[in-house]
Amino acid sequence: MNYIKHLTGFFEKVSTDYDLNPTHISLYMAIFQLWNQNRFQNPISISRDELMRISKIASTATYHKCIKELQEREYIEYNPSFNPFKGSTLNVLNLDFYTKPIAKKDIKKIKNKAKTQLEFNLVNEQVDKQVNEQAVNKYQTSAKHVPYINNTNSINIANEQIQKNKRKEIKNKEDTEQKEIQKKRYEKKNKIEQSIPPDKNEVIAYFKEKNTPTIEAEKFYNHFESNGWLVGGKTKMKDWKAAIRNWILNSQNFSKQATQSFSGTNKPQPQHLQTSIHKNYGEPL
């Protein structure tokens, strides 16, 4: 195992993987350290606490997210153990395919020697990368040799453009969502305002829905039709259904007060006038 070639292949691969961030690289370096201590033998037994300590990852959720994404992108093969008394194991996948160009005559041989589907995918990915780089180099210059620094600058410019496009896409999405929210608010506001004054049949139907006599609907409609649908004679009505509910509550309160005034001690009694019963009409006024 040549760890120099492996690390070179890792950084070649990660330089074009735009979804990875420094946390993924830090975690992979911690895994590489444990792999080094195990003399680069697979599989290795790992400890979540130890990897988090070495990679300086403080969140368990972040750790699991990063290790899952490293596995999806074929950097590692993670075998979790759900037994608290048995540690999880991990295979570090070979990344030497990314360190040197593959000759066309050797592609078929390497594919035949690939033992697993993961290795086969790595070979295909390296071949595609080699073809793309050749096309880029041919487009940039007609010289036989392209300086490495120019190639690096081209990659950096491409990465920067991709990140800029992503930020622009996110901003456009946020602007679109904000416009939709404002549009819905405006439509909701206009819908309420346009429903005033309501149709008389709608008012009667709503009174019936509240089990209130139709005469009350007539009183309500005539009252507010006469004052221009103003609440308290000043404020423009916003919700006529809420006004009907208040009207019903107030009418019930008036009915109770009227009933109480004509019952009990308040009921008018005969011969309780403020005059004497036996009046002498001979006396002067």
Image: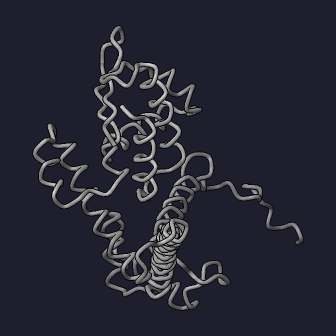
Locate residue 254: give its quadrant.
bottom right
Out of 220 and 119, give the one closest to the viewer. 119
Out of 232 and 106, give the one closest to the viewer. 106
Residue 6: x %, y % from top left: 40, 40
Q: Is residue 268 visible?
A: yes
Position above or below: 29 against 38: below
Name of the residue lying farthest toward the front: 144
Position above or below: 141 against 86: below
Q: Is residue 21 left or right of residue 64?
A: right
Locate residue 140: give its quadrant.
bottom left
Image quarter where the N terminus lies is top left
Name of the residue lying farthest toward the top: 85
Q: Is residue 82 left or right of residue 276?
A: left
Locate residue 278: give its quadrant.
bottom right
Type of colouring: one colour
Position above or below: 77 against 104: above
Image quarter where the C terminus lies is bottom right
Q: Is residue 191 left or right of residue 206?
A: right
Residue 272: x %, y % from top left: 68, 54
Which residue does the image show at 60% across and 84% down from the upper left? Answer: 236
Which residue does the image show at 87% across and 66% down from the upper left? Answer: 283
Total marks shown come to 0
Out of 160 and 226, give the one closest to the viewer. 160
Residue 142: x %, y % from top left: 40, 84
Out of 95 and 88, give the one closest to the viewer. 95
Name of the residue lying farthest toward the right: 284
Q: Is residue 243 visible?
A: no
Which residue does the image show at 47% across and 43% down from the upper left? Answer: 24
Residue 204: x %, y % from top left: 34, 78
